[in-house]
C-alpha cells in the first residue's frame, strides 16, 4: 500500500445513500421472452431502457460511433485523429472509407476485468414474469432488497462512472484506500453471511431498511451501543486516517452527535447521507461521499499536533456542519440547517480547492469529551421503584458498552393553553406521573427532556412543573430546552437542567450520555416530602449534569 489515506467506511441503518431504485426488467428482455414492452403513463412505448451497472461475463468487441460523446465534438472535428475505421449499412467493418455514408467508428474490446458497464437489465422473475419494481410479489411474500449491504459497490460505481472536473474518474480511489464495515446496516444477507459461512442475518436484528414498507425496521436503543463499540474498535486499531459514517438522512444528526460525545479518538469522524437514492435522478450521495473523503485526506481538521480539532462533522452539499448543531430541515438536497442560532457551519468543501475551515467548535468532543468511552465507568448508580438506588453495569471488562446499558430518555413537548380552565391548579399531571412510574419500572437509567416555552424551557402549567420536579426527586433528571430550533440559551432553573441552545433531540442524546457517565440522581426516600439534605444532594448532583450541558 502506498501513502494514500486508509479510511474505514461504515454502513449504518436506514441509509438512503445506500438505497437503489428498483431493478426493472428491460424491454430487451421483455421482447426476448415474448412479453409486451414497458409503456409510460400515456400508453406510449418507452423510448429508452434504463441501464444498470453490471459485469461482462466474457469479452465483447463493440464499435462506437465517432463524435457521439458530446453534442459539440463534431464542431471541432479538425482537432480529432481519424477513426479506427468505418461501418457500412450492413454492419461490415473496414479500415478505410468505402461508401460516402459509412459510419466512422472506434473499435473497442471490452473485458470483464474492465469493471462495471451500463447494460440493460435482463433478469426475470422465477414465475416467468418481468420485474416491475421493488415489490413484484404479494406483500406477504419475500421481496428483493433495495439497499446495498455496505459501501464497496457504491465506491466502485463512483470510481467507474462519476466524472470529476478534470474529465477523469476514480474520484475516490485516487485519494484513498477503503476498508468496508457494516454496523446495523440497511441490507442483510438472509441466506448466508457475507462470506457464505456466517449464520443468516435477521431483519430488524442485524439490518434495518426502511423500504419496502412491508419490511421496514428501525434500530432499537440497544443498537446505539453496538454502533459505539464498533466505531471505537475501528479507531483503536490505529489503522485509519478517518471514519466515514453513512446513515439515513433524518437519523444521522443524532448518531453523529452521539459519536462526537462517546468516541475517544484523535482522528476525524465524518458523516454523510443522501436525500435521494444512489443513481436516482438528482442523486446527491456520491458527491457527499467524495467531499467527505476530500475532507479526511486534506487534514484541515488537524491541529498543530495532528489531532482532530473539529470533532465529528456532517458534510452535506459542500457544507461542513458541526455535529452538535446540524439538523435535517427538508427532504431535498440542501435540506440541512443549523440549530441554536449561533453558527454551526464550520467550513466548506469543493469550491475550487481544498476544503476550508472557517470556525472551530468550542464544545468538548471525542478525545477531550468528558463523556467518551474511556471516561465512562463500568458501573454507575441507577434508581428503581422497588429497590431505590441500584448499581447498573454499563460496560464490560473490555470497556465496551453493554447492549442494555443505553438510558431511556423521553421527550415531552409542551405548549400553551393546555390547562382545563384558567385556574387549573391540579396537584399532578397524571400523564407525567404515569411516565415516571414507567421509567422507574423499566430502566434504572432514565430521564426526561422537556421542550417548553422558548427560550426558557419551562413547562406551561404549575401542575406539570410540579410533576416533573417530583420526577427529579425520584432520581430522574429533567432537561429543559426551548421549542423547535431554539436560539436562546435555556438556563438551569430550580431542579431542572438547562439545555442551553440544544434542540430536544440533541439534548436527549447528551442526557443519555451523561447518565452513562454520572448515573441517576440520588432519590429522596419520600419524593413528595424530601428533606433539606435530600434537596441539597439533588442539587449537587444536578450541578455535575449542568457542567456537561454547558461544555458539550
Image (spheres, grey):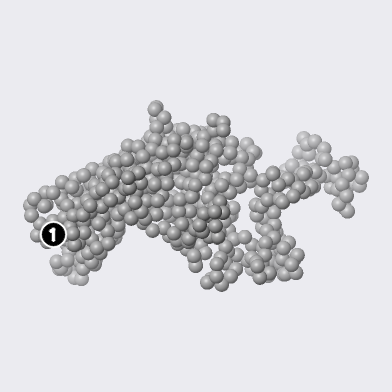
**Quarter of the rendering occupied by the N terminus:** top right
In the rendered view, does 271 fall on the left or right side of 341?
right
Residue 525 in the image: x percent, y percent? Answer: 12, 58
- Whether 8 is drawn above or below 457: the answer is above
Q: Nearer the viewer, residue 30 or 125?
A: 125
Residue pushed farthest front? 197
The residue identified by callout 1 is 527
Q: Position of residue 452 (x, y in %)?
A: 26, 57
Percent across and percent down for residue 473 are 16, 56
Query: How many numbered discs, if any?
Result: 1
Quadrant in the picture for the C terminus: top left
Q: Residue at x 21, y 59 (%)?
A: 384
Residues 184 and 257: in front is 184
Query: Neighbour class for label 1 at 10 Å: few (<14), some, many (≥20)?
Result: some
Image point (77%, 44%), residue name: 109
Identify the residue at horizontal 74%, vertical 50% (top origin): 58
Q: Depth check: give the residue in front, 153 or 21.
A: 153
Residue 506 in sight in this render: no
Amino acid at each position: 500500500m502506498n501513502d494514500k489515506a486508509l479510511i474505514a467506511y461504515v454502513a449504518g441503518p436506514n441509509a438512503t445513500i445506500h438505497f437503489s431504485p428498483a431493478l426493472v426488467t428491460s424491454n430487451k428482455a421483455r421482447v426476448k421472452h415474448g412479453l409486451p414492452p414497458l409503456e409510460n403513463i400515456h400508453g406510449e412505448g418507452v423510448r429508452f431502457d434504463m441501464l444498470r451497472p453490471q459485469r461482462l461475463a466474457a469479452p465483447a468487441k463493440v464499435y462506437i460511433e465517432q463524435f457521439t460523446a458530446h453534442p459539440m465534438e463534431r464542431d471541432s472535428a479538425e482537432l480529432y485523429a481519424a477513426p479506427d475505421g468505418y461501418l457500412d449499412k450492413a454492419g461490415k467493418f473496414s479500415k478505410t472509407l468505402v461508401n460516402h455514408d459509412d459510419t466512422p467508428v472506434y473499435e473497442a474490446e471490452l473485458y470483464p476485468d474492465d469493471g462495471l458497464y451500463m447494460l440493460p437489465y435482463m433478469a426475470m422473475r422465477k414465475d416467468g414474469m418481468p420485474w416491475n419494481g421493488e415489490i413484484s410479489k404479494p406483500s406477504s411474500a419475500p421481496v428483493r432488497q433495495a439497499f446495498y449491504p455496505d459501501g464497496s459497490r457504491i465506491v466502485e460505481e463512483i470510481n467507474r462512472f462519476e466524472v470529476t472536473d478534470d474529465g477523469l474518474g476514480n474520484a475516490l480511489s485516487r485519494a484513498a484506500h477503503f476498508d468496508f464495515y457494516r454496523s446495523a446496516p440497511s441490507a442483510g444477507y438472509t441466506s448466508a453471511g457475507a462470506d457464505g459461512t456466517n449464520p443468516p442475518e435477521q431483519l430488524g436484528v442485524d439490518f434495518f431498511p426502511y423500504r419496502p414498507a412491508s419490511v421496514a425496521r428501525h434500530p432499537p436503543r440497544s443498537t446505539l451501543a453496538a454502533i459505539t463499540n464498533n466505531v471505537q474498535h475501528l479507531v483503536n486499531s490505529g489503522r485509519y486516517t478517518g471514519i466515514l459514517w453513512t446513515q439515513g438522512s433524518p437519523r444521522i444528526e443524532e448518531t453523529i452527535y452521539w459519536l462526537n460525545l462517546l468516541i475517544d479518538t484523535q482522528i476525524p469522524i465524518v458523516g454523510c447521507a443522501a436525500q435521494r437514492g444512489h443513481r436516482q435522478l438528482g442523486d446527491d450521495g456520491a458527491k457527499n461521499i467524495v467531499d467527505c473523503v476530500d475532507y479526511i485526506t486534506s487534514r484541515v481538521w488537524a491541529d498543530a499536533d495532528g489531532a482532530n480539532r473539529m470533532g465529528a462533522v456532517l458534510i452535506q452539499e459542500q457544507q461542513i456542519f458541526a455535529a452538535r448543531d446540524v439538523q435535517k430541515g427538508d427532504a431535498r438536497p440542501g435540506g440541512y440547517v443549523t440549530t441554536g442560532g449561533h453558527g454551526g457551519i464550520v467550513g466548506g468543501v469543493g469550491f475550487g480547492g481544498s476544503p476550508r475551515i472557517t470556525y472551530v467548535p468550542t464544545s468538548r468532543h471525542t478525545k477531550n469529551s468528558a463523556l467518551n468511552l474511556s471516561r465512562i465507568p463500568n458501573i454507575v448508580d441507577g434508581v428503581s421503584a422497588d429497590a431505590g438506588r441500584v448499581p447498573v453495569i454499563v460496560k464490560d471488562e473490555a470497556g465496551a458498552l453493554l447492549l442494555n446499558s443505553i438510558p431511556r430518555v423521553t421527550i415531552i413537548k409542551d405548549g400553551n393553553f393546555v390547562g382545563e380552565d384558567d385556574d387549573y391548579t391540579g396537584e399532578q399531571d397524571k400523564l407525567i406521573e404515569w411516565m415516571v412510574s414507567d421509567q422507574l419500572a423499566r430502566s434504572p437509567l432514565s430521564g426526561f427532556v422537556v421542550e417548553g416555552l422558548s427560550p426558557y424551557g419551562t413547562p406551561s402549567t404549575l401542575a406539570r412543573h410540579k410533576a416533573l420536579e417530583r420526577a427529579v426527586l425520584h432520581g430522574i433528571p429533567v432537561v429543559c430546552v426551548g421549542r423547535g430550533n431554539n436560539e436562546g440559551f435555556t438556563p438551569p432553573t430550580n431542579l431542572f437542567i438547562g439545555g442551553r441552545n440544544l434542540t430536544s433531540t440533541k439534548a436527549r442524546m447528551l442526557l443519555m450520555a451523561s447518565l452513562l457517565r454520572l448515573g441517576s440522581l440520588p432519590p429522596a426516600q419520600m419524593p413528595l416530602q424530601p428533606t433539606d439534605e435530600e434537596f441539597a444532594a439533588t442539587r449537587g448532583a444536578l450541578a455535575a449534569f449542568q457542567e456537561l450541558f454547558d461544555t458539550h
